Image: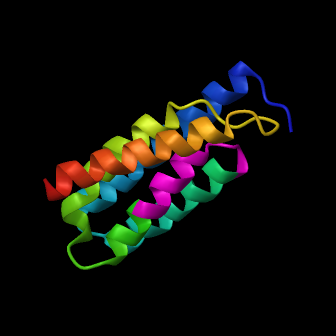
Amino acid sequence: MRIDHDQISMIRAELSLMVGKVSDHIARGTPLDAIDDVDAIRRKAAGYGFGAAEHIAGALESSLAGIGGSASAKCYLEALVDAIGCKPVIENVGIRANARASEALLASVALRTHG
């Protein structure tokens, strides 16, 4: 599937709005709703080649499902916003860059949450 710059911008905007909903759910103390929305982000990111966002969303989903996951959620949400800004994989171009971005963003979350 070929997507152009305008479509990528629209998808980024949609994903960013979805991140805002997750943040609202966490602030209201409704982690199950947050988990559902993060899963939707992960699926949408995967469908459009946003591999870094897909991986960060998966890690956030796991974190929220664990004990005390909401405590580290802010770091994951910040990393997810950064991941949404990464160039998507289009026709197998950018796979390595997305993998490296995922690793770097997850490392930054680990440093912020565990020192």
Report which quarter residue 6 is drawn in: top right
Q: Residue furthest right?
A: 1
Q: Main secondary structure of the magenta part?
A: helix
| Residue depicted at 49% across the width and 62% down the height | 58
| Residue depicted at 56% across the width and 34% down the height | 12
Q: Is residue 113 left or right of residue 35?
A: left
The answer to whether residue 74 is visible is no
| Residue depicted at 16% across the width and 58% down the height | 114
Q: Which residues are magenta?
A: 47-59
The answer to whether residue 9 is visible is yes
| Residue depicted at 33% across the width and 69% down the height | 64
- In the image, residue 10 lies at what x, y percent? 63, 30
Q: Is residue 115 left or right of residue 89?
A: left
Q: Is residue 24 above or below residue 10?
A: below
Q: Residue furthest top?
A: 5
- In the image, residue 45 lies at what x, y percent? 61, 48
46 or 7: nearer the eye? Answer: 46
